[in-house]
Amino acid sequence: MVETCLFPAAGYGTRFLPATKAMPKEMLPILTKPLIQYGVEEALNAGCRTMAIVTGRGKRSIEDHFDISYELEHQIKDTSKEKFLTEIRNIMETATFSYTRQKEMRGLGHAILTGETLVGRNPFAVILADDLCFSEGEGVLTQMMRIYEKYRCCVVAIEEVDSHEAHKYGIIAADVIEEKIFRVKDMIEKPQKEKAPSNLAIIGRYILTPDIFNILRTTKPGINGELQITDALLELAKLGRVIGYKFEGIRYDCGSIDGFVRATNDFYQRMQK
Ligand code: G1P
């Protein structure tokens, strides 16, 4: 059972400036719900009960969002508006939240290593909240849990991308072992188009085994001078201990304006149905 889901949430969100000058990018809403809440709901549906959030300076509103707001609760108690808080109240009753701060932005691998203190020596999930996933059936993390139960090693969610987009992602080389399931042999973070080993990109959903922390401690900074989770995972991939899973559903890159607008439009259309 994977109990904890880690949310790296310390990034600046520069692509959304000035909106993200004083507000965390994870709090940008798709309709009425902040991005991070969608991620937390996906983790809860997948059976995680502990949300471990790696924050940074200026991210207090994330903590406040998953806490009681006495004044507001008092104001809207027994009014028709109370229903708007039902979902978030349910989350707060079911999940436990813990936080730690990443003092310097030194890459996703560094953010995950910072979360070690919240995760302990157990397998854990990672959700990057700006990759918003939607599926008609089971959530993406729930699908991945099943793969983890079977293979008992790291699992990364993957999707096909155009070759001119390879430089935005971790790209894998892999052998098919079952429908939609791959054994990863190689992985490169943000390769140039010509160097991409395939068109299969990692998206922001991972299940990691705790041995990743020791590997991260000795991994050298990679592309952009950052500690990359992809480089650390490569060590485990060489041992055959990373599975790529082509998930069912749609992923919106809400770290980009295009993806954010698309998510907003699609979620709005679905709400009208
Ligand atoms: C991170 C990872 C990358 C992955 C991507 C998915 O990159 O480093 O391997 O493909 O998330 O969104 P970032 O988007 O933080 O640059």
Image (cartoon, rainbow, N blue to C red):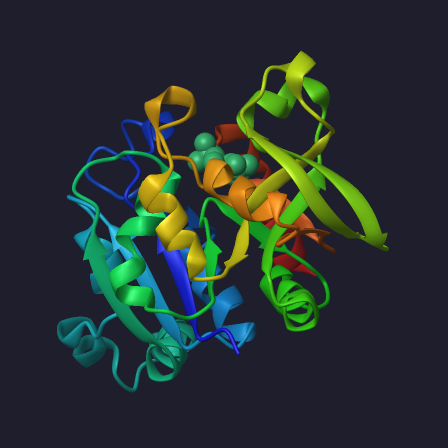
Q: Is residue 33 left or right of residue 137?
A: left
* Residue farthest toward the bottom in the current orientation of the protein: 78
* Left or right, residue 44 beside residue 89: right
The residue under the point 68% across, 68% down is 138
Q: Mark yes or no: residue 109 visible.
A: yes
Answer above or below: position of 113 versus 208: above
Viewer-proximal residue among 240 and 174: 240
Residue placed at 20% from the left, 63% from the top?
64
Q: How many marks?
A: 0
Q: Is residue 27 left or right of residue 268?
A: left
Query: Where in the figure is residue 242, as x and y percent of width and height?
Result: 62, 51
- Image side of residue 42 versus residue 85, left or right: right
Taking the spot 53% from the left edge, 79% from the top edge, the residue there is 1
Residue 95, picture quadrant: bottom left
**Depth check: 151 or 124 in front?**
151
Query: x, y percentage for residue 118?
Result: 28, 65
150, 255: nearer the viewer: 150
The percent coordinates of residue 33 (x first, y second) are: 42, 57
Residue placed furthest toward the front:
239
Q: Quadrant of residue 100?
A: bottom left
Quadrant in which the C terminus is drawn: bottom right
Q: Is residue 265 visible?
A: no
Dividing the picture into quadrants, the one containing residue 5 is bottom left
Q: Position of residue 214 (x, y in %)?
A: 36, 52
- Residue drawn at 63 percent across, 24 percent down: 166
